Image (cartoon, coloured by chain):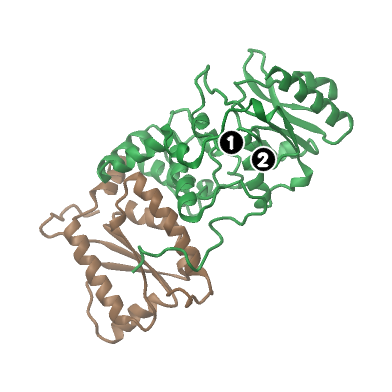
Amino acid sequence: MEKTNTDQTFEPKIIAFVCNWCTYLGADLAGTNRLEYPANIRIIRLPCTGRIDFNLVIKAFEVGADAVLVSGCHPGDCHYNAGNYHARRRWILFRELLEVLGIETERIHFSWISAAEGAKFQKFVTEIVDKTRALGPYRGYQSITHESEER
Amino acid sequence: MEYQEYQLRETAAKLLEEEKANVVIGYGLSKTGKVVPVFITRPEDAQKLVWNSECHQNLVVFLTRPEVKRLGKPAIVVKPCDARAIVVLANESQIMRHEVYVIGMVCEGVNEDQGRPSSRCAICYGHYPQNVDQVIGEAEDAPKDLSKEERRKTGKYQRIEEIKALPPDERLAYWKREFSRCVRCYACRQSCPLCYCNRCVADKNRPARIPTSASLQGNFAWNILRAFHLAGRCVSCGACSAACPAGIDLNLINLTLANAAEEQFDHLSGTKVGALPLIGTFSESDKEDFIR
């Protein structure tokens, strides 16, 4: 990981796990509509929010993400009928676990963004980039990775 | 307790004689006098069974082992907390409930490690076994069960509240200290009655889902994975904490999730026969105040 980043020039790295059918197309729509949003976000497309393994979130922090975005179809809109409902229940419990472990849950963002909501995607991404910039780099989890590398 | 032991031996001998079971999984004594699991296959050996306050191990873990399955139809000695694990195994189609004869012991609490009371007993969910085929012991002898509110006041829950009250970086520092001792022996996995996958995701290496070395990074990934795979399933039997050679109170993390499942979904794992798994089902009215 590049070590040149100082806090003044801090550009957050944000990993977005999005579903193929709604949020990815929402991001696509933002693009075709020429809606500009910060380039800090790295989008990873998955078949469904139900596929977003909790391990992926941990993995994202392991490789140096400052924030994670998880987004999919609105309830009732899932391409596979219920993937997002399954995901929602999983995240309710997962957040409780992260809370006790001391992993900052304000760095994990959840949203429902449909294929028609390019503007919502732009607004949401801009917001979380600003918020993460204010929070600063996620030294907490990064220190775990660094300490592991030093050994 | 002595009378319970006598009754247990009688029951086991009878089950084997009548061929209602081919093997009785219970507690016995090792050559050094330590309480260990025993697998009794002959009626005359039923005298080797013991029942005392050192019987802390959860024997349910053996029910899904192929080498134990080969012994034939099992009968198993369980404590009330272990009995809940059997319910989960049956609900998850890992065992055929009618093929197992479950002997439930009325339990007054057990010790682990030379007379130190087991930490799980402090949060006991019930001293009288439920959903078993036969109960040994009298309900009157069992200590009074804690109510949900009383349980919340016990040490373990208090410890979770204490940790929750710390600022995030101190919470993380606490778990960093704990997990840095983990040697990745996977004793927590092996001792858990509900960690029954033939091939654990932690052992898969193409691709490796989590770092396999005992680095802090790998230890965090593993312990998060283990805890979350037991979300809504863990029955708080405490086998993981008892097995951990590094003395990490793993049950604390599981209890956090069990607590959340109880608070949010009114789901107490292993108390309802035929219950659907908590994760794997959903309700359209699940809360979503954290989703934008």
Q: Residue at 31% across / 55% down in the picture?
A: A105
Chain at tag 1: B
In the image, B272: left or right of B229?
Answer: right
Q: Is residue A137 above or below residue B141?
A: below
Frontmost residue, A68 versus A101: A101
Q: Is residue B111 above or below residue A142?
A: above
Extreme residue in the right direction: B18
Q: Residue at 67% across / 50% down in the picture?
A: B273
Q: Is residue B31 visible?
A: yes
* Colour given to chain A in the rendered image: brown
Q: Which chain is green?
A: B
Q: Residue at 29% across / 42% down in the picture?
A: B165
Quarter of the view holding residue A121: bottom left
**Circle 1 sits in a helix, a strand or a loop, which is it?**
loop
Quarter of the image where the C terminus of chain A is located: top left
Q: Residues at badges 1 and 2 in contact (C-beta under 8 Å)?
A: yes
Q: Is residue A51 visible?
A: no
Q: Would you name the residue on which mark 2 appears?
A: B130
Residue B63's label in the rendered image is: none
Type of amino acid at the residue the image marks with label 2 = Gln
